[in-house]
Amino acid sequence: MKLDSDIQQMTMIQAINSALDVMMDRDPDVVVMGEDVGYFGGVFRATAGLQEKYGKNRVFDTPITEIGIIGVSIGMGAYGLRPVPEIQFADYIYPALDQLVSEAARLRYRSAGEFTSPMTVRSPFGGGIFGGQTHSQSPEGIFTHVSGIKTVIPSTPYDAKGLLISAIEDNDPVIFFEPKRIYNGPFDGHYDRPAKGWAGHPGAMVPTGHYRVPLGQARIVRPGEALTILCYGTMEHVVESTVADMGVDAEIIDLRTLVPLDIEAIERSVKKTGRCLIVHEATRTSGFGAELSALVQERCFYHLEAPVERVTGFDTPYPHSLEWAYFPGPVRIAKAIDKIMKD
């Protein structure tokens, strides 16, 4: 990975904005579109200032129609542009599923490579902000099931920028889910403590220019010998804090991308530790943790000292009044670690 710029401290929002700015400056085919992304700069301000800098033809507001946003983006990509549409909240991506699944994901295959869909769909996802059932969902597992779509989830500002640049430069459709709970600072899962900013966090030191974080390459957050913990997004920070509080010699792996998956890093770690815990915020049944569990079982069975454990959201809509019961927080993670270490 080559860095060609100075380094600044950034929040995840600033890092995402910087990635879009860098790519729009480098490539005139990059176009940003979505609800309120232009003049307003997006609900979370991720696109602030881009319309003023690049004009209304390259950064523009769309009607409130997710299927239309994605349908137009597919057409743009087929004719040589690199659209970066924003779905305002991941909960609203479902109306666009037909376009994403039936068209974007299959365009290269169906056209024998004549057409591609170089589109990066950005969308805030996950809970922790009292958004209730319609602003808190984690639908990543749906997209990992669809052949032809890549699924990316950053957990730090550094990764957010580098992964977003890699996604925009990729010739296949990428779903880029942004954990909104950590837009402005890491979250340790203790909702009753004061919020933290990104200041002082090593993952907040971000090059101002162009760089890539490769898709399909996991990050070892913390090396360890006793237990492997697989996580991504907000959960990386909750897991890291919990492990530190417990004093467990756990190896924490931030997957970064779910598809493509760095299965080699997972396999090396589990064969070393003999134990595996999977943590994600999405619902349990058919969540991505089920696929991870199956892969670990298939590849590392004779090295496992205990059954694979999962800590996830529950199989219910995301509750507003019981948000922290649903959220996979430190208490539930600690119980799972205790169980797997005793088995």
Image: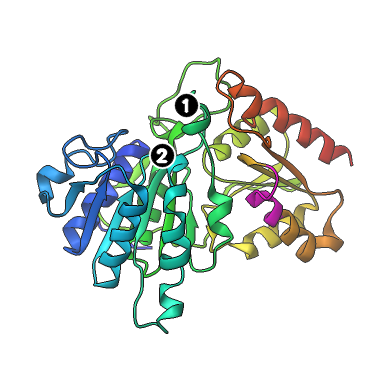
Instruction: Give the number of the disc on residue 227.
Output: none
Decide whether residue 291 is among the magenta residues. Answer: yes
Instruction: Give the number of the disc on residue 89.
Output: 2
Q: Nearer the viewer, residue 337 or 245?
A: 337
Decide whether residue 89 is among the magenta residues. Answer: no
Vertical arrangement, residue 129 with respect to residue 258, above or below: above
Q: Earlier in the sequence, mark 2 or mark 1?
A: 2
Tell me the CA gap for discs 2 and 1.
10 Å
Vertical arrangement, residue 193 with respect to residue 208, above or below: above
Q: Is residue 252 visible?
A: yes
- Residue at image coords 49%, 56%: 151
Kindly check if marks 2 and 1 are in contact, taking CB atoms under 8 A apart as contact. yes
Residue 68: where, in percent of width, then height? 31, 53
Which residue is disc 1 drawn over?
A: 131
Q: Quadrant of residue 244?
A: top right
Question: From which residue to which does the magenta span run?
Answer: 284-292
What is the tally of numbered marks visible in this picture?
2
Residue 202: where, in percent of width, then height? 43, 39
**Kind of residue at badge 1:** Gly
Left or right position of 159 against 253: left
Vertical arrangement, residue 114 with respect to residue 220, above or below: below
> Please, what secondary structure does the residue beneath circle 2 have?
loop
Q: Nearer the viewer, residue 106 or 178?
A: 106
Residue 97: where, in percent of width, then height? 46, 55
Left or right position of 200 against 222: left
**Kind of residue at badge 2:** Phe
- Residue at image coords 53%, 56%: 143
- Residue at image coords 47%, 40%: 91
